[in-house]
Amino acid sequence: MGLLQEKDKEYIRNLFSGLENEVIISNFTQEIECQYCRETREILEELAELSDKIKLNVYNFVTDKEIAEKYAVDKIPATVIEGKEDYGIRYYGIPSGYEFSSIIEDIVDVSKGDSGLSQESRELLKQIDAPLRLQVFVTPTCPYCPRAVRLAHKMAIENPYIVADMVEATEFPHLSMRYNVRGVPRTVVGEDHAIEGALPEKQFIENIVNYFKTMKK
């Protein structure tokens, strides 16, 4: 029995009928000592079955080490979504609950190769001209988290210097502790700056760009 109900499959299938270009989903997993690896793979398998434009590659985190290193994947379960290029979109942890909508919408954006950000936001992001990592800490039951995840992933699509990770906070408690995650969403920018909550697009991007400029000084 699948994880998705038939009515959900039909809705997603209709949404995916508008996919423009092939989307490649790479799932990094292993059978033992990985909570939610199996469930993550099953979710992705069901999604891939809903469109012939989606290709799913499943890799073993240990035996396919070179491929994991190519994508800089350092923990599992991990999901990479790419289109004509690797836009830097990463999911660490199971994309369930509210985050299920994020991965569906990311697939649509990646197929278009367009962030969908406002022109003002696109101009702002041009100021980021060196590698920058965003880590958005979430939980599946957080209704505000997808907004932060989607904005971070849109920024990654728009700017090749940005890599944006969704990190499921309860699956990676050592990272939650390291980055002082006490509430979600919490977006960690680089290593020493954080944004609390789900901000509007302009405010979110201005915050990150301003931090980047101070970091470069």
Image: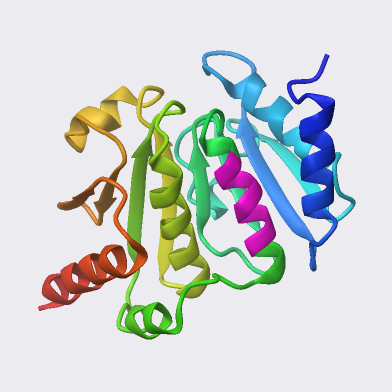
Q: Position of residue 201 (x, y in %)?
A: 36, 65
Q: Residue at x 79, y 62 (%)?
A: 19
For this view, does 78 lie left or right of residue 74? right
For this view, does 33 lie left or right of residue 145? right
For this view, does 187 lie left or right of residue 95? left
Q: Residue at x 81, y 31 (%)?
A: 7
Q: Quadrant of the C terminus?
A: bottom left
Is residue 37 placed above or below 123 in the rendered structure?
Answer: above
Q: Which residues are magenta?
A: 101-109
Residue 5 versus residue 49: which sits nearer the camera?
5
Is residue 178 placed above or below 36 in the rendered structure?
Answer: below
Q: Does residue 146 show up?
A: yes
* Colour scheme in use: rainbow
Residue 130: quarter of image: bottom left
Based on the picture, tell me whether residue 105 belongs to the magenta stretch.
yes
Residue 9 versus residue 65: which sits nearer the camera?
9
Q: Does residue 65 show up?
A: no
Number of numbered callouts drawn: 0
Q: Position of residue 153 (x, y in %)?
A: 48, 58
Q: Quadrant of the N terminus?
A: top right
Q: Residue at x 46, y 44 (%)?
A: 146
Residue sticking out furthest to the right: 52
Residue 143: quarter of image: top left
For this view, does 8 lie left or right of residue 143? right
Q: Would you say the magenta stretch is mainly helix, strand or loop?
A: helix
Q: Position of residue 34 (x, y in %)?
A: 53, 18
Based on the picture, tell me whether residue 96 belongs to the magenta stretch.
no
Q: Residue at x 38, y 86 (%)?
A: 123
Q: Position of residue 35 (x, y in %)?
A: 52, 16
